[in-house]
Amino acid sequence: MTDQFLSPHISQSMLNELPVLRITNDRASATICLQGAQVLEYTPTGGDNLLFVAQGEAFKRGQAIRGGIPICWPWFGQHPKLVDAPTHGLARELVWQYRVVADSDIRTDLLFWFDCDGQHPAFPYPTRVELLISIGSSLVLSLTTLNLGSEPFQLSQALHTYFACQDHRRVRIQGLAERPYLDKLTGKIGQFPDGFSFDREIDWVVSDLGQPLLLSGLGQKAIQMSRLGSRSVVVWNPSVEKSQTLSHFLPDEYQRMFCVEASNALEDCRLIKSHSSHVLVMELTAVDIDATDPA
């Protein structure tokens, strides 16, 4: 299938079984899959792709994609009650509708959305979900959940961002030192260490104040993450043993990725009242510090 050009900066094509939008403007390029409204690539002009996608990914219809920025909604992890409900919610395997909001040489804005009719047994609430993705000098995702029904519901969610790196052991995360975290592997509570490194399997939910974070030691430009509507961060790397159980992962790929996820998890889950909404925003910006500096 040849590319279908939707505007001077946007085209649509197929990635195996999945339709994707490809955006190229003067400031960046990006690839967004319509299934899951999932950003698969974001590359500032003259720079490197910030995101990781597993090389063994098959891009098949109805299968979650391992990499990029999956949207975990309206629950993060396992469903709180139904053991057979899909992990990380409903949004990743749906084909979202979209429209172009704005498109210029320096910025492209696309709005994605889907509606829940309140009939799903795992989430029986009428809801509209909207995701505004802005591609320019930074990448911005703004995820809005609107309760259209008469009953409130609990919302937990995450922008499950897979970042690319050359060696996960050199990655450093600034901005979380001494914040409390839950180790999901052991159930223990700890404090995020100032000298944190991915030296083993890590699956932590960190409670914080929503402050900016700096991700460095990537082997390329560092990344600043800014958030709104989020006071929790998920930090994850599967390490060698866990990665061998993950679909689409090659044996050593865990060394070239890590996740730091803007989220509403654990005590940061949100109660969405009738005809009210919650907005979760994440902005990623490549910043010019020494690409080899792990501090």
Image (cartoon, rainbow, N blue to C red):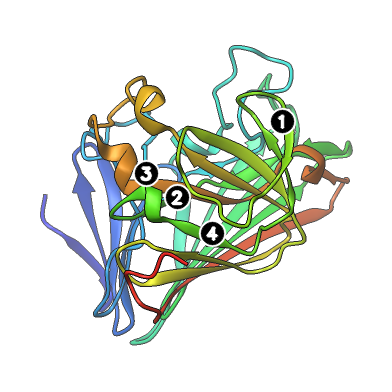
Picture quadrant of residue 53:
top left
- Return the residue nearer the eye: 270 or 274: 270
- Residue drawn where x is 56% and y is 35% of the image: 203
Residue 203 placement, left or right of 280: left
Residue 168 placement, left or right of 183: left
Q: Distance between the residues labelled 3 and 4?
A: 20 Å
| SS under mark 3 | loop
Q: Mark 4 points at which residue?
A: 173
Q: Could you tell me the amino acid type at mark 1?
A: Gly
Q: Distance between the residues labelled 2 and 1?
A: 26 Å
Q: Earlier in the sequence, mark 2 or mark 4?
A: 2
Provide residue 180's location: percent of width, then percent of height: 76, 46
Mark 3 vs mark 1, foreground winner is 3
Q: Name the residue under label 2.
A: 69
Q: Residue 67 carries which label?
A: 3
Q: Could you tell me the amino acid type at mark 3?
A: Gly
- Residue drawn where x is 39% and y is 48% of the image: 169
Provide residue 187's location: percent of width, then percent of height: 71, 25
- Return the residue nearer the eye: 5 or 28: 28
Q: Earlier in the sequence, mark 2 or mark 1?
A: 2
Q: How far apart are marks 3 and 2 (CA)?
A: 6 Å
Q: Which mark is residue 118?
A: 1
- Return the residue nearer the eye: 8 or 75: 75
